[in-house]
Image (spheres, grey):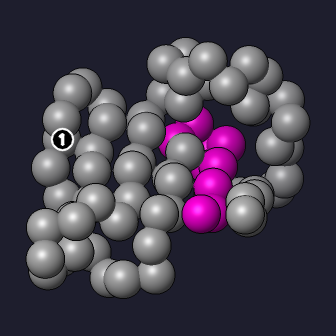
């Protein structure tokens, strides 16, 4: 899993798989799921990440000039 935070747009992308996305669906305001060709979720895009997540201080932990990538697992 890889997390990428984009401070200029305050968006967080959670990459769940290396498979390419072929479809995206907004499941609630500002939350988009990306699906592969088999219909499996491969990524999650969260707009206004600092306001809608409980990841406490994500904008303070990630303050690069362009974007920050965090690889988990």
In what quadrant of the picture does the N terminus appear? bottom right
Vertical arrangement, residue 59 with respect to residue 56, above or below = below
Chain part drawn in magenta: 1-11
Residue 43 image offset from top left, x and y in percent:
39, 59
Q: Quadrant of residue 24?
A: bottom left
Q: Which residue in the structure is indicated by mark 1?
A: 26
In what quadrant of the picture does the C terminus appear? bottom right
The secondary structure type at the circle numbered 1 is: strand
Towards the viewer: 66 or 37? 37
- Residue at x-position 68% and y-position 25%: 55
Left or right of residue 30, residue 8 in this image: right
Vertical arrangement, residue 12 with respect to residue 73, above or below = above
Left or right of residue 30, residue 5 in this image: right
Residue 46 image offset from top left, x and y in percent:
43, 39
Res. 66 visible in picture: no
Residue 72 image offset from top left, x and y in percent:
72, 60
- Residue at x-position 22% and y-position 65%: 40
5 part of magenta stretch:
yes
Residue 33 image offset from top left, x and y in percent:
27, 50
- Crowding at dot 1, Cα within 10 Å, few <14 / some 14-19 / many 20+, comes out as few
Left or right of residue 23, residue 3 in this image: right
10 part of magenta stretch:
yes
């Amino acid at each position: 899993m890889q997390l990428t935070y984009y401070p200029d747009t305050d968006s967080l992308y959670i990459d769940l798989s290396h498979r390419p996305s072929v479809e995206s669906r907004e499941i609630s305001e500002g939350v988009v799921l990306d699906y592969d060709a088999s219909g499996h979720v491969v990524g999650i895009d969260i707009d206004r990440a600092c306001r809608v997540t409980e990841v406490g201080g994500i904008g303070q932990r990630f303050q690069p000039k362009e974007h920050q990538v965090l690889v988990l697992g």
